[in-house]
Image (cartoon, rainbow, N blue to C red):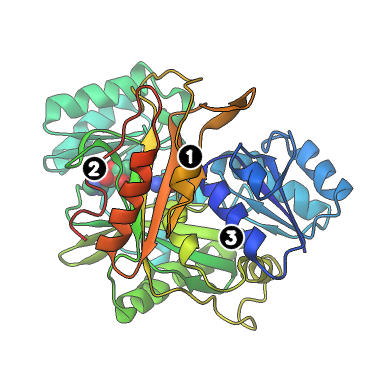
Amino acid sequence: MRVLVLGGGGREHALCWALARAPSVDAVLCAPGNVGIAEVAELHDVDPTDTAMVRELAVREGIDLVIVGPEAPLVAGVVDSLQAADIPVFGPTSEAARIESSKVFAKDVMAAAGVPTARHWAGNDAQSARAALRDFDQPYVVKADGLAAGKGVRICVDEAEAGEALTELMIDQLMGAAGSTVLIEEFLEGPEVSVFGLCDGSDVVVLAPAQDFKRVGAGDTGPNTGGMGAYCPYPLDQAALDGLRDGVFRPVLAELAVRGARYVGVLYAGLVLAADGPKVLEFNARFGDPETQALLPRLSSDLAEVLAACAAGRLASTPAPRWDERSAVTVVLASGGYPAEYQTGKPISGLDEAAAMDGALVFHAGTRLDGDQVVTAGGRVLAVTGLADTVGQAREIAYAAADRIDFDGMQRRDDIAAAG
Ligand code: AMP
Ligand code: GLY
């Protein structure tokens, strides 16, 4: 198989790395990729949201399977465009990807499918939104309906702060059109886990849960980020996973199919394990980043085969993916200032020493070459994964490898998987 991965972050590096190891894969191409991805894939300088250019690339290169990493190309319709040209693609159509791009749509689907989630109010009138706060308790959860790069959710301690959040979204339009419709939600208490289902339109394989560390600071302090680290597997027993398959994934796939939006790709359920059972916080239409960097190093079967089976709608007749029993811990190295403003172009040292360590993998997220020197090029710069028999050992390897790497202003959390 010749496979093309769209995207250029740490998640896509992990995908390309796993695909390059897959026996069924003859060539891995990536657009646009990054410095680390260039070691395992052939890079093409094509914008993944430019659906016509992506299709042209896939046709020209004789691609047998396209795998879409981030949400933006999905929402832009890259899957629709590839399907129209009969190119197999792992990812949902723009209509099906609304499960991520509209939180109101996701809530409608969950209600129709009987999936447990936080009680909510939704609307686009600021006065009604303020009045609706009365039906909720502190702390208030205020969300923009649309995509807001992880910045669309505010947890507000009191009604005054919730009122401000509503004004910022609906009147000041700080998130643009994404915030013209808002949701107010019941606050859910409990550990958060990310569970990915590989979907073929009607069937699903539920993968081992991962936990993401979303806040920038140790002890879950400071603003939300894309994710500062992860570990996998998060301990959930098989009965709980079967419960999620039958109570969350299958009903959502069935409901989307009824709506004419067959779902192919990763369905990512962000869950809170509440005292009265798991509840869905949100769905994403893609693999999580950095969870994927902790998930895929544990895969011992062929990634391309299972993703191709999803794209072809034949998951049921394909052997389930096999996993290494070991645990993986991933630590993100980010630019100083992230998730607010940060500088780029900082030379990175120690990459080879870190990657040479036993059980360590270094995935590139925001990097580029300046001459021969690898320099920073984004907020999240690298994701360092350790793989070992226990979470504790994997954590030691990840941090020992991360200790070898340095760049000006580098920040990381020192408590990833500390309790595991
Ligand atoms: P979301 O983009 O919807 O996943 O929200 C981002 C983060 O905000 C989540 O990972 C949670 O930590 C938090 N959050 C969102 N909704 C709720 C809720 N209803 N209750 C508690 N925390 C929430
Ligand atoms: N790590 C969270 C996400 O990928 O959305």
Secondary structure of the residue carrying tag 2 is loop
In x, y percent, where is residue 159? 13, 30
Is residue 102 in sight in this rendering? no
In the image, what residue type sits under mark 1?
Leu
In the image, what residue type sits under mark 2?
Asp
Q: Residues within 10 Å of mark 3 (few under 14, many from 20)?
A: many
Q: Residue at x 35, y 51 (%)?
A: 398
Residue 311 numbered mark, or none? none
Residue 181 horizontal side relative to residue 131, left or right: right
Q: Nearer the viewer, residue 218 or 35?
A: 35
Q: Nearer the viewer, residue 23 or 254?
A: 23
In the image, what residue type sits under mark 3?
Ala
Is residue 143 in sight in this rendering? yes
Q: Is residue 201 above or below residue 38?
A: below
Q: Residue at x 80, y 52 (%)?
A: 84
Q: Mark 3 to mark 1: distance in Å?
A: 20 Å
Q: Residue at x 49, y 24 (%)?
A: 347
Q: Mark 2 to mark 3: distance in Å?
A: 27 Å
- Residue lying farthest right? 60
Question: Label 2 belongs to which residue?
Answer: 414
Whether the residue carrying mark 2 lies under 8 Å from ligand 2 is answered with no
Front: mark 3 or 1: 1
Q: Mark 2 to mark 1: distance in Å?
A: 19 Å
Q: Are marks 3 and 1 in contact (CB under 8 Å)?
A: no
Secondary structure of the residue carrying tag 1 is helix
Question: Label 3 belongs to which residue?
Answer: 18
Q: Residue at x 75, y 38 (%)?
A: 44
In x, y percent, where is residue 69? 58, 48
Q: Is residue 229 above or below residue 45?
A: below
Question: Label 1 belongs to which residue?
Answer: 351
Q: Nearer the viewer, residue 142 or 31?
A: 31
